[in-house]
Image: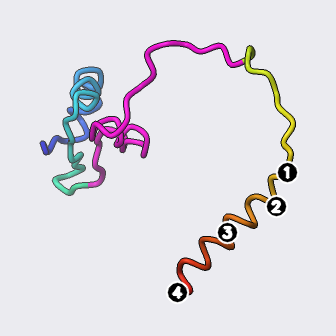
Amino acid sequence: MRTIPHRELRNNSSKILEEVSNGETFEITNHGKVVAVLSPPALTPYERLIAAGKVQRGTQRRNFSSIKPTIADRDPLEVLDEMRGQRDAMFDE
């Protein structure tokens, strides 16, 4: 982490912002006192999963409009209630 006076940030903002976009963090001072920290934005949960190698971005576009809708033979809420009952029974044992 580098410490710079606010005057340097004002005079070299493009260069400093480029460094921030490359991962650098800056403490900004005013009259020798740290008044701000300038750092890259935090990763979203999805970006953290990608960085950890747990998921990867899709490489192809899919056309989901060709999928035909189906009519369920049971009410989805009924199925969920049944699944929740089975789950609860597992923890009651």
Residue neighbourhood size for the residue with mark 4, other residues' Cα within 10 Å, grouped as few (<14), some (14–19), many (≥20): few
**Magenta span has 39?**
yes
Q: CA distance from mark 2 to mark 4?
A: 23 Å
Residue at figure coordinates x 36%, y 44% from the top left:
42
Residue 35, compared with residue 88, is above or below; it is above
Q: Which residues are magenta?
A: 35-64
User: How many residues crowd around disc 2 within 10 Å: few (fewer than 14), some, or many (20 or more)?
Assistant: few
Q: Nearer the viewer, mark 3 or mark 4?
A: 4
Q: Which residue is mark 3?
A: 84
Q: In the displayed structure, does residue 93 sit left or right of residue 65?
A: left
Task: Say if the magenta span includes residue 47.
Answer: yes
Q: Position of residue 89 (x, y in %)?
A: 61, 79
Mark 2 touches mark 1? (CB < 8 Å): yes
Q: Is residue 59 above or below residue 48?
A: above
Picture coordinates of residue 17, whole percent (x, y): 29, 27
Helix, strand or loop at label 1? It is loop
- Could you tell me the amino acid type at mark 2? Glu
Asked whether the residues under the numbered discs 1 and 4 touch, taking CB atoms below 8 Å apart as contact, a structural biologist would say no
The residue that appears at 23% across and 21% down in the rendered structure is 15
Residue that mark 2 sits on: 78
Q: Earlier in the sequence, mark 1 or mark 3?
A: 1
Secondary structure beneath dot 2 equals helix
Label whose residue precedes the other's in the sequence (1 or 4): 1
Q: Which residue is mark 4?
A: 93
